[in-house]
């Protein structure tokens, strides 16, 4: 009859294990039947009402461009509608049974705690994931993370956590003088997971703060972000080791294994990480620089831990390892300043007036908006060739990130049009098309080249 005793504030609930034993094979107390009825009706009602409410809330969610706070609130309501309704129904049913029917509600007490914990965890994980970004990598682990956290809380609520810990602690291995059990490993993994979430949140907040700092240039911002990530990640690992009870002296074994791994197969990885810090602190390559490495020409978009992202004029993002930028020759179009000279060769025939052509080339260059007025465009006579006079137009631009192919094409088109209007002929090199043989009267055969303009 203990279950029929009216609850008192100082009365502890019956252990959950005893409640489960009282349910087998059938509940013997009417109070238990009442609680099971509340649970069943609450589950069905929450599923039915929550389903329809979730559909209405889903339709109320606007596109990503709408108010962010309102959209997050509506999506949160859609996600937790079922467990929240179930939790509220259990609270109401428990209050009704305790105060009107004067029966104990120990079973509802445990289920209310578990349902409330699941609702809060679901809301917390969703809001935390959305605080990173709607499409963050945490989205794929949102369900697993929610289930893991709630399982730990549920084991604590039902009083089964000590038993689970005892079972996990029975399986252990000795690492030196330290005993490492399955409980230790599980605690370490869970601690790493929880601390990594905190790490991601702190890194994102600091990343936004550092990028907004006006007193730092792009290289120093990248360096600070990398250092913050490295320090926080090391702190996360040490904190997880201490939380799980692993003796830090065992790290000597791990350090030896890591050194062997670096020596055998991680040289490139470590080299790229170190090279990344060298590039940042030397400021030889910065975000926004225009560089050429081998056959790759483009604008530096980002300096990452292992590679540099270079966007080419074709819209392609090329990932270049940091080590290549340290060991290879780099042509930077914007290291000292962003002024770059572009050379455009032109060849005219010997019959044309070179002075007129030089003046016309300079006039054409001044019509381009990208060409700088200072230094002014200049045209030169380079040499007198067999097939014509070699000229060269030199212009300066200060936006190399836009590329020079389009500018060169526009200038060449204008040169062809203006030269044609002024009667200036663009010369071309001859092309050998055959060898003809001439037989003289004395029987001696002579060869001569027959060619025409290319």
Image (tube, grey):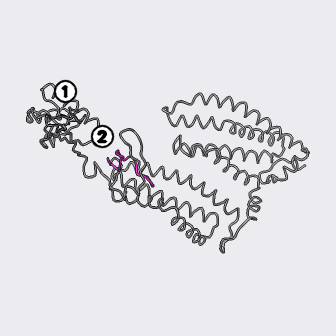
Q: Which residue is mark 1?
A: 417
User: Was residue 297 drawn as part of the magenta stretch in this picture?
Assistant: yes
Q: Quadrant of residue 432?
A: top left
- Give the x, y percent position of residue 384: 12, 41
Q: Which residue is mark 2?
A: 403
| Disc sitting over residue 235 in the figure | none
Instruction: Give residue 46's position: percent from left, percent from top.
Output: 73, 34
Q: Residue at x 56, y 64 (%)?
A: 238
Q: Quadrant of the C terminus?
A: top left
- Distance from label 2 to label 1 (Cα)? 23 Å
Which of the two labelled residues, at mark 2 and mark 1, occupies the earlier sequence position? 2
139 on left or right of 428: right
Above or below for 231 versus 248: above
Whether 198 is among the magenta residues is no
Question: In the image, which residues are magenta?
Answer: 290-307
Give me the residue at 8% from left, 35% from top.
Answer: 355
Residue 170 drawn at (x, y percent)? 76, 65
């Amino acid at each position: 009859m203990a279950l029929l005793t009216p609850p008192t504030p100082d009365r502890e609930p019956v252990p959950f294990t005893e409640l489960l034993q009282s349910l087998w094979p059938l509940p013997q107390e009417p109070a238990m039947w009442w609680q099971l009825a509340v649970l069943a009706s609450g589950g069905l009602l929450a599923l039915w009402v929550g389903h329809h409410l979730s559909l209405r809330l889903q339709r109320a969610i606007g596109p990503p461009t709408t108010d962010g706070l309102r959209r997050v609130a509506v999506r949160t309501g859609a996600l937790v509608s079922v467990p929240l309704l179930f939790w509220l129904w259990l609270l109401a049913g428990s209050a009704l049974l305790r105060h009107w029917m004067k029966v104990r509600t120990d079973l509802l007490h445990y289920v209310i705690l578990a349902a409330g914990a699941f609702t809060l965890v679901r809301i917390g994980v969703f809001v935390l994931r959305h605080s990173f970004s709607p499409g963050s990598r945490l989205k794929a682990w949102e369900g697993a993370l929610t289930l893991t956290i709630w399982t730990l809380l549920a084991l604590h609520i039902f009083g089964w956590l000590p038993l689970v810990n005892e079972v996990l602690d029975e399986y252990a291995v000795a690492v030196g003088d330290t005993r490492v059990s399955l409980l230790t490993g599980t605690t370490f993994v869970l601690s790493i997971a929880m601390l990594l979430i905190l790490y991601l949140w702190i890194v994102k907040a600091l990343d936004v703060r550092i990028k907004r700092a006006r007193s730092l240039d792009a290289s120093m911002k990248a360096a600070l972000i990398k250092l913050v990530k490295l320090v926080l990640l090391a702190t996360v690992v040490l904190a997880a080791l201490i939380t799980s009870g692993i003796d830090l002296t065992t790290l000597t074994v791990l350090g030896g294994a890591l050194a062997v791994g670096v020596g055998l197969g991680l040289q490139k990885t470590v080299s790229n990480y170190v090279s990344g810090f060298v590039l940042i602190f030397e400021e030889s390559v910065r975000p926004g620089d225009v560089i050429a490495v081998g056959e790759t020409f483009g604008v530096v978009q980002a300096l990452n831990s292992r590679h540099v992202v270079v966007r080419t004029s074709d819209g392609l993002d090329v990932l270049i390892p940091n080590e290549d930028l340290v060991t290879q020759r780099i042509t930077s179009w914007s290291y000292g300043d962003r002024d770059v000279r572009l050379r455009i060769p032109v060849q005219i025939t010997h019959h044309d007036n070179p002075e007129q052509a030089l003046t016309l080339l300079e006039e054409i260059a001044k019509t381009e908006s990208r060409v700088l007025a200072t230094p002014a465009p200049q045209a030169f006579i380079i040499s007198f060739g067999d097939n014509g006079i070699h000229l060269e137009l030199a212009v300066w631009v200060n936006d190399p990130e836009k590329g020079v192919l389009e500018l060169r094409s526009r200038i060449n088109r204008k040169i062809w049009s203006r030269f044609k209007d002024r009667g200036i002929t663009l010369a071309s090199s001859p092309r050998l098309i055959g060898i003809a043989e001439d037989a003289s009267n004395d029987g001696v055969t002579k060869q001569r080249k027959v060619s025409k303009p290319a």
